[in-house]
Image: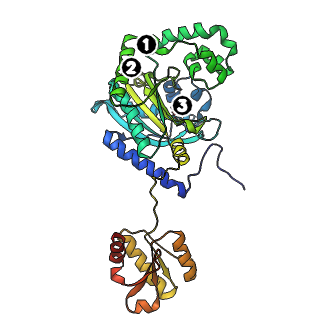
């Protein structure tokens, strides 16, 4: 049997897990300071939730969902994004009865049947934040400043913030008509995808990556010229806060994003050196979604970070902020009674909070010293019969080669004391 991992999935090996844990620790610390609370929702949901929430005419719902029928004939879908599930949980658990806005965050796997390439997978992880129950434009800004702080805390440089407003359903309706009028007669020059979009979801034509389509939409007037009074006012306040907080951003009138639920402000953060898949996160307001999927009408805003892409960007920039961990000590022994003593020492030191390794393969002292070296241990504790008779062990400093006789009862004190010197 030659079973391989499914296309578009990744194994995260122990040598890389430390990087994930480093980023996750930064996320949890930041969310704590910003008052976001973790929520864990199912990895699969009723298909209907995504059809209604994300929108039937979106790429995700049309062709990227992992949908299956379970043994009771229910249609279920592996979540392609986090917002719909969080909003469903918000409604189902009546979180609106708690102080608003509800500020929630999640970290977890998402699934999309996309064409895999560097930075684009079929299973990938997102860290997302959602604030439900307030129209405050400062919340839109928080959705930009929190990720910026995260990226910086992880050691990332060179990212760019893009902002736009796509208005509410009313102003968007007017803009759709303008778009169709501008682009209608050239419909046949667009890529196949956009020809379909022009009819069903014309805004998506604006951010098609096809160079020919990009050229065709160049002359289209920006959506921000068609915002209604309320949307224009909201956007003005968002930009004012961004300026006040000295956030560098670029206005991108072509930024529309892939889900139907977005309203008003949308944003994306990119790292241009990542190439084709350069967005390391994005989000926006979704003032109609809570009501759309059965809750009371409450405005909301969210952002999601692509974890793999963030880690790719950090690797590319040879990030050195990752903590390097290695065992404090390696215990070498010679089998027999020295192994028995080594087992006791290792257990005791671990209980006292140290990371200690020992030989499990009955190897020679030379091989054990090599292992200690490979582990990058500072200390090797050599448990020999002669020393045991005096209730001592030899402790070698691997950097200097110096050896010390240390009483069995004093090993921890010796190691930690020597570490603090
Ligand atoms: P979205 O949910 O499409 O708004 O995406 C938010 C972020 O998730 C993007 O900016 C990417 O960083 C990441 N992302 C989206 N799709 C994928 C994918 N197929 N593979 C890896 N990362 C992804």
Within 10 Å of the Cα at label 2, are there few (<14), some (14-19), or many (20+) other Cα atoms?
Answer: many
- The answer to which of marks 2 and 1 sits earlier in the sequence is 1
Q: How many marks?
A: 3
In the image, 93 versus 247, the foreground residue is: 247
Query: Residue 274: horizontal and vertical position, in percent?
Result: 57, 39
User: Label 1, on which residue?
Assistant: 227
Query: Residue 107: horizontal and vertical position, in percent?
Result: 45, 43
| Residue 235: mark | 2
- Colour convention: rainbow
Within 10 Å of the Cα at label 3, are there few (<14), some (14-19), or many (20+) other Cα atoms?
Answer: many
- C-beta proximity under 8 Å, tags 1 and 3: no
Within 10 Å of the Cα at label 1, are there few (<14), some (14-19), or many (20+) other Cα atoms?
Answer: many
* Rendered view: 105 above or below 291: below
* Rendered view: 331 above or below 58: below
| Residue 47: mark | 3
- C-beta proximity under 8 Å, tags 2 and 3: no
* Rendered view: 312 above or below 339: above
Query: Residue 50: horizontal and vertical position, in percent?
Result: 51, 29
Cβ of mark 3 under 8 A from ligand 1 = no
Q: What whole-number distance in Å separates the C-alpha atoms at marks 1 and 3? A: 33 Å
- The answer to which of marks 1 and 3 sits earlier in the sequence is 3
Q: What whole-number distance in Å separates the C-alpha atoms at marks 2 and 1? A: 9 Å
- C-beta proximity under 8 Å, tags 2 and 1: yes
Residue at disc 2, secondary structure: helix
Residue at disc 1, secondary structure: loop
Q: Can the viewer see residue 298?
A: no
Q: What whole-number distance in Å separates the C-alpha atoms at marks 2 and 3? A: 33 Å
**Quadrant location of the N terminus?**
bottom right
Q: Can the viewer see residue 197?
A: yes
């Amino acid at each position: 049997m030659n079973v391989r991992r499914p296309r578009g999935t990744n194994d995260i090996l122990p040598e890389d897990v430390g990087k994930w844990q480093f980023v996750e620790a930064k996320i949890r610390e930041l969310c704590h300071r910003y008052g976001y609370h973790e929520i864990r929702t199912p990895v699969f949901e009723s298909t209907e939730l995504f059809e209604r929430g994300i929108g039937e005419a979106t790429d995700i719902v049309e062709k990227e969902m992992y949908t299956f029928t379970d043994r009771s004939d229910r249609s279920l879908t592996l979540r392609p994004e986090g917002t719909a599930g969080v909003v469903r949980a918000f409604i189902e658990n009546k979180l609106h009865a708690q102080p608003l806005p509800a500020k929630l965050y999640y970290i977890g796997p998402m699934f999309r049947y996309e064409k895999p390439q560097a930075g684009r997978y079929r299973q990938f992880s997102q860290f997302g934040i959602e604030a439900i129950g307030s129209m405050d434009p400062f919340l839109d800004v928080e959705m930009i400043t929190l990720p910026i702080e995260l990226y910086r805390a992880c050691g990332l440089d060179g990212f760019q913030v893009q902002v736009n407003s796509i208005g509410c359903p009313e102003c968007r309706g007017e803009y759709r008509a303008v778009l169709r009028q501008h682009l209608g007669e050239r419909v046949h020059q667009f890529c196949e995808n956009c020809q379909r979009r022009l009819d069903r979801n014309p805004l998506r034509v604006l951010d098609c990556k096809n160079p020919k389509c990009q050229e065709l939409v160049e002359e289209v007037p920006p959506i921000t010229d068609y915002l209604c009074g309320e949307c224009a006012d909201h956007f003005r306040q968002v930009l004012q806060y961004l300026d006040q907080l000295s956030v560098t951003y670029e206005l991108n009138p072509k930024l529309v994003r892939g889900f139907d639920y977005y309203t008003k402000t949308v944003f994306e953060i990119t790292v241009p050196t990542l190439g084709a898949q350069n967005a390391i996160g994005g989000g926006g307001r979704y003032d109609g979604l809570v009501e759309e999927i059965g809750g009371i009408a409450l405005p909301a805003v969210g952002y999601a970070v692509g974890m793999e892409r963030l880690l790719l960007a950090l690797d590319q920039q040879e990030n050195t902020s990752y903590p390097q961990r290695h065992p404090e000590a390696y215990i070498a022994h010679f089998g027999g009674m020295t192994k028995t003593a080594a087992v006791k020492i290792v257990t005791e030191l671990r209980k006292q909070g140290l990371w200690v390794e020992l030989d499990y393969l009955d190897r020679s002292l030379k091989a054990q010293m090599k292992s200690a070296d490979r582990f990058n241990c500072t200390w090797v504790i050599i448990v020999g019969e002669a020393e045991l008779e005096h209730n001592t062990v030899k402790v070698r400093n691997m950097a200097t080669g110096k050896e010390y006789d240390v009483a069995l009862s004093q090993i921890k004190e010796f190691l930690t004391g020597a570490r603090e010197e």
